[in-house]
Amino acid sequence: MEKVKVSLAIIFFLFISHSSHSQSAGSAPFVRKSLMSMSGGLGGGIFIYHPVQNIYFTGSFSYCMEERIGIRSDFYLFIPDAAIGGQLDRNSTILLGPEFHFPAGHLDWTILFQPGLSFSYLKDEASTNQTQAEPVLTLSTGLTYYFLHNFHLGVNAQYLRGNYFSESIDRYNISELRFTAALGVNLFVNHQAAYQRKRPKF
Amino acid sequence: MKKSFTITLVFCLLFAQYLFAQKQMRYKHDQDGTFSIGIRSGLSFENSADGINMSQGLGMQFRIMPTKRINTEWFAESFHGSYGALGVRTDTHIGALALLYPQRRMQRVAPFLAIGPNADFIKIRDRLNKNNFESRWCIGAQAGIGFHINMTYRFDMTLSTQYMLHFGQPVALQLNDGNIIYLPHGGSVLDGHLLFNISFNYKMADLWKKLKFH
């Protein structure tokens, strides 16, 4: 019953956001085609199948190829903490995938679907010092606020699915919930299509 | 059931507004000649002596559309997952697909039939010892169905399912504890797996536009 209520609330919110888009035609959204952004921040993660928390430095680069669709690459640089028992020794991640924008004024709600690689290593279960690249799949949602024309502040929640096959009979499930906050810079590039640009005169 | 219905509904609502928001791609003549690139991810299901295993993968691809009704997809991908209780399997595919469209012209949702060859590299290793492994190169073939969802004139999401057959020598991996892992586990020459792929593609250029004189 509770789940149904939550689902209805989400659907209602989506309907509202649809209608608010159509009525606020006067104030064009800040996010549009040719927006390029870079950001850096800090993130925390919780393994779903292990009682372990992780901390990451994060960075991202994105470019809006179309009005509401862009491509985005993210990296998560794992910061190991010796005080936390059971943690992996290495678990950095790189991701690449499409970003769907739902802008409203200077706010932008995004949904991302990014496959990528996790570079995992657990010393206790490995005979070598070699980091292993494991394919992962992520689904993320985020909220970004653009200010002073060239800056933005964003928060992001992400579900990551993957497994690390170390030298153990059981795989290490690295599925994780990650939350990040980031500050970044942005600018618009390629304001005009190539054929519309003026040719230089010599 | 309710949950999946709700998720489907939410996704439909999310992406509905994309369908009419974008400008048309400027084709000089027709859709043939379209070059697009994309990333792909997927799941692979294969049978082993201990039951069905699932591997997760990722890869990249590009497409060149030679005619209105036929597209070609060139891809490289890798799947990684467990193989039975004692093994770890890695599959790397480099291949090509012909995508055959039944529709006369590309629609918002475009179903297709896919068929094509590939080169396949399989590596099976002992779960307890990375250095104990067997590998082989072989050729394979795959066929299946799928559909593009053209979210804009340039961007599409593609979902597909295919069955891939490998035509190679059987592999036997001797484990340290005396057990042996066989691929294929039944002793047959044919080995295959079921693939589910999702990919996101962006149309970069109309390659043929300078070659046509109308």
Image (cartoon, coloured by chain):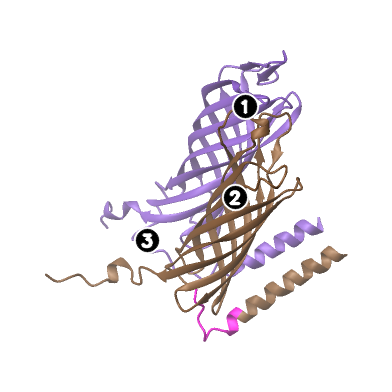
Chain colours: A brown, B purple
Looking at the picture, which amino acid does disc 2 mark? Ile
Q: Quadrant of residue A34?
A: bottom left
Dot 1: chain letter: A
**Magenta highlight on residue A22:** yes
Furthest-front residue in this view: A83
* Numbered disc 3: secondary structure: loop
- The answer to whether B38 appears left or right of A134 in the picture is left
Q: Quadrant of residue B2?
A: bottom right
Q: How packed is label 2: few (under 14 Cα within 10 Å), some, or many (20 or more)?
A: some
Residue B147 in sight = no
**Magenta highlight on residue A118:** no
Which of pointers 1 and 3 indicates the residue nearer the eye? 1
Where residue B65 appears, x then y in whole percent?
A: 42, 48
* Quarter of the picture holding the N terminus of chain B: bottom right
Task: Mark 2 and mark 1 in contact? Answer it, CB < 8 Å.
Answer: no
Q: Mark on residue A79?
A: 2
Structural distance between the alpha carbons of marks 3 and 2: 48 Å
Looking at the picture, which amino acid does disc 3 mark? Tyr
Q: Which residue is mark 1?
A: A127
